[in-house]
């Protein structure tokens, strides 16, 4: 199963407005634990940060991952940056996560940028919410498709995005051909297996992996 962890430092302790520095320390610690556990991908998704702040955090996480090798641990974890290919290059990240929104970067454009910089071929993932977007992501040769929200999206206990459902996930997996599809949105310990049975090759989530680290699951 492909494990794709997404960051959201706002959910990390402490959660008061004046504790940004401590939340970043918590984020670095979480990234290290994910890398130690051989999580396949970490998507840095802190949308509120400036490019400079994103680069600083991405460099720190990259250093954390590389430090494990110096300790004799060969982590396979790869760091992807949300939407910002230039920052990914500057920080030495392994790739970029894109959205299916109109006017976005394409996988081909990201790969061209990495090639021009003399970097290895990047990993490019794309989030999709419709079959049309899935087909386009497959056609554009994305490395991974994140499809959802399979079980909906909640905020403060209220559903803000309705669930696509397992049948929609199954259709997305069929439409994606040989491109791996990861289930995104509301995935828990109790429903993860049903996503895999529907054809998903793995799970993409924020709380699912963070909660496991903090002992809230299992």
Image: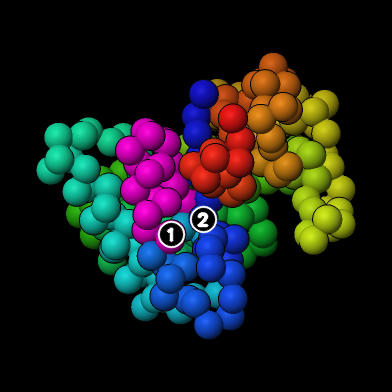
Marked residue nearer the N-terminal end (1 or 2) = 2
* Rendered residue at 42%/51% (across/down): 30
Would residue 195 be found to the left or right of residue 44 on screen?
right
Place of residue 105 in the rendered image (x, y in percent of width and height, measured from the top left): 52, 60
Classify mark 2: helix, strand or loop: loop
On whether residue 148 falls in the magenta region, the answer is no
Q: Quadrant of residue 28?
A: bottom left
Whether pointer 1 and pointer 2 mark residues with C-beta atoms closer than 8 Å, the reply is yes
Per the image, the residue denoted by label 2 is 7
Secondary structure at numbered mark 1: helix
**Closer to us: mark 1 or mark 2?**
1
What span is in magenta? 26-43
Mark carried by residue 109:
none
Question: Closer to the camera, 54 or 105?
Answer: 54
Q: Is residue 7 left or right of residue 51?
A: right
Q: Nearer the viewer, residue 61 or 95?
A: 61
- How far from the left and from the top, in percent, is residue 94? 33, 49
- The residue labelled by disc 1 is 27
**Residue 106 visible somewhere in the drawing:** no
């Amino acid at each position: 199963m492909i494990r794709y962890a997404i960051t959201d430092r706002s959910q990390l302790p402490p959660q008061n407005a004046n504790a940004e520095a401590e939340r970043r320390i918590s984020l670095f610690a979480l990234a290290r634990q994910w890398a130690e556990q051989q999580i396949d991908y970490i998507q840095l998704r802190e949308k509120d940060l400036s490019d400079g702040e994103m680069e600083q955090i991405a460099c720190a996480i990259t250093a954390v991952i590389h430090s494990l090798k110096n300790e004799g641990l060969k982590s396979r974890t790869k760091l992807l940056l949300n939407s910002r290919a230039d920052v990914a290059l500057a920080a030495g990240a392994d790739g970029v996560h894109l959205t299916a929104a109109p006017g976005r970067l394409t996988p081909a454009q990201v790969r061209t940028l990495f090639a021009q910089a003399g970097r290895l071929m990047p990993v490019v993932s794309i989030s999709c919410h419709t079959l049309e977007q899935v087909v386009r992501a497959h056609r554009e040769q994305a490395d991974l498709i994140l499809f959802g929200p399979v079980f909906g999206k909640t905020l403060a206990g209220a559903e803000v995005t309705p669930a696509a459902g397992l049948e929609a996930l199954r259709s997305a997996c069929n439409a994606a051909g040989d491109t791996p599809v990861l289930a995104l949105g509301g995935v828990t310990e109790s429903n993860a297996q049903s996503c895999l049975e529907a054809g998903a090759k793995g799970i993409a989530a924020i709380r699912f992996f963070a909660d496991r680290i903090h002992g809230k699951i299992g």
